[in-house]
Amino acid sequence: MSLTSHHEARSLSGAAADVTTKAARRRSYLGTLRRQPAVLLALVPALTFFCAFWLLPFTRLVAMGMQPDKNSGMIAYWAVVAQPQYLYSLLWTLLVSIGVSLLAVATAGVAGFFLARNRFRGKAMLVAMLTFPLAFPGVVVGFLVIMLGGRQGALAQFSMLLFGERWMFAYSLAGLFVGYLYFSIPRVITTVMAACEKLDVSLEEAARSLGAGTWRVTRDVIVPALSPALISTGAICFATSMGAFGTAFTLGTRMSVLPLSIYSEFTNYANFTMAAALSVTLGVITWIALSFARRLAGGSLGASA
Amino acid sequence: MSSSIAITLKQCGRTFASGHTALEPIDLRVEAGETLVLLGPSGCGKTTTLRLIGGLETPDPGGRVWFGERDVTALPIEKRDVGMVFQNYALFPNMNVTDNIAYGLRIRRLSAGEVRRRVDEVMEMVGLHDFARRGVDELSGGQKQRVALARAIAVRPKVLLFDEPLSALDAKLRDRLRLEIGTLLRRLGTTAVYVTHDQAEAMALGDRVAVMERGRIAQIGSPREIYHQPHSAFVADFIGSVNRIAIGGTRDGWLEVDGGRLFCPRLHGADHAYCRPEDIEVGDPASAPISGRVVQSFFLGQSQRLLVDTGGDAPLQVEAPARRQWRRGEAIGLSVASDALFHPHHPLTFGQAAAHG
């Protein structure tokens, strides 16, 4: 049995030809764009908007962060890492966001897979309830955490009844963690459920036919197939947690997360330089996470081509 | 691999939760070392039967599946020791060719040396020795299906299951791989069940063929039996082309048909006779028992297909030698040998081997 039959060789060169025609099409498309001023004219509103509301303020923000901080006299960007209060704020925010993202992906990933694979009475209702937090602003999420773990919360009342003391977690780091987890879970569930729809069931059947049990199938087939979705949804949870303001503000956590630090530098101390430096730092970290997510999602789409 | 086993299905039906019955309760036996082809149009229950054998589906209560002497009805596929080849290849995209083929061997915890030896052996068998380190995305469709085949046979399964493995390939490659699979199956001697809707594939690969229709087995037998002695018009029509000739009357062994008459005492009393296009002989219009006019001709290379109007409802399909050219409207004489005529309710009793169950 010789391998590369004529035929297969031909289909391979066919694929190469296909790639070149695609490139040619793209070139001619750009050509059309250049030749038609009307197209450029249509872009003017978007460009204006981009310049006025993004490019100009952001350039100012970046430049402002270069100036010395009025308390320490350091360049503000340097102060972010050199001044403990800012560094701790940054590190804690990172830590909470990473922790929340990992836990959300692990728990909601399993739940999303279960929901995608099983049919039962009331499933639509359950999915609707689980994804409901997406509709809440951060303030409401914070409020819900207080209802659960605050001074008058359910847990406090329960422990008062049993042990005569109030247990609370709402105003600590744990409260923040729970709140962030609460709005991260629906994102993971919806993404994972959508990704499960696209799983190739015959891959699992092939693995099973070769003797793989549930655990091996999960490890060797399902998790690898879902990993782009898991990583990208995790990155989005991370970005959302990094920038979450309402929840932290409502909870009034003793630990000041980065968005709260920015807010207080800005409003309480009128320290615009520091606020700008912290904002740019937050923006860059979040942007890296999001572009990472986008590239993975795009990569998984490209793989099938 | 001499220790092949037989497969027995007893009253295996499958009704889905939606209430749709994919398979009526059937009895089926695949002999040890035999290749059985399940053939039929989509929705006939052939894939469901395959999945019942593999353990991807469970039969409705009352149905039982045996591998040899062992009742495997309750066993899931991972405990049945089968090898399965899918239409869409189902190769693990996160593993290269070697790791795909070695997958089942590693699950069986064979030593690294043994795994390497067995992988090399099956790669040689399917002609893939140069592709060990390739990613599966870098392979053509035919190469992918070879990897899938190698992966399935590497574990030396008791039973090999094929779910339309060639349907996604183009015609030329399909023919080639069909021959290779046939050779391989005979060499391995493993009991195999092969699902297809392609009758040529069924004929070439099956020791026996089961033609399925609407959740039932319409007929099971050797390819020759199925082709030459179809038990129903459905089977006759599904396997190859068939002409249905109306019989006006019968006299002294002759059947009165449109355009002339045919000699066949066996079909006395039948209202129709059937025959294959290649069993109709072309002759002199003046002396042949049936005469008609050529309506159309299709050149096929090795032969040509003629449509001949004999005055009946539908023109007769005739497989004629390729060399002679026919003009539209030209007179043509036809004859059919007595034993090439058949009718499902008037089976042959002489001349050919009698059908056996």
Image (spheres, grey):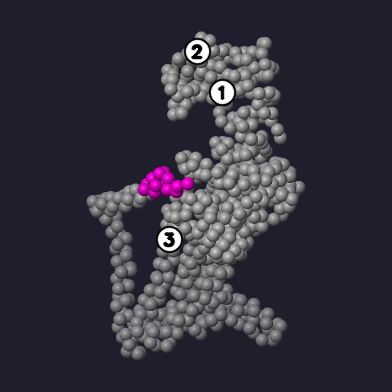
Q: Is residue A305 above or below residue B294?
A: below
* Quarter of the image where one finds residue A186: bottom right
Q: Are marks 3 and 1 on the same chain?
A: no
Query: Would you identify the image quadrant in which residue A262 lies?
Result: bottom left
Q: Is residue B48 visible?
A: no
Question: Badge 1: how crowded within 10 Å, few (<14), some, or many (20+)?
Answer: some
Identify the amino acid type marked 1: Asp
Outermost residue to the bottom: A72
Residue highlighted by disc 2: B284
Does residue A269 appear left or right of residue B250 in this picture? left
- Decide which of B41, A8 is in the foreground and name it: A8
Q: Chain of mark 2?
A: B
- Determine if marks 3 and 2 fall on one subunit: no
Decide: few, some or many residues near mark 2? Use Cα within 10 Å; few <14, some 14-19, many ≥20.
some
The mark lying in front, picked from 3 and 1, is: 1
| Chain to which the residue tagged by mark 3 belongs | A
Q: Position of residue A82 (x, y in %)?
A: 38, 87
Report the mark closest to the observer, 3 or 2. Answer: 2
Membership of B268 in magenta stretch: no
Looking at the rendered structure, the secondary structure element under dot 3 is helix
Say the numbered circle drawn on residue B279.
Answer: 1
Question: Number of callouts in the render?
Answer: 3
Q: Quote the CA–CA distance across marks 1 and 2.
A: 16 Å
Q: What span is colored magenta in the figure?
A: A1-14
Q: Residue at x 27, y 55 (%)?
A: A40
Q: Chain of mark 1?
A: B
Instruction: Compute the Cα span from label 3 to label 2.
Output: 69 Å
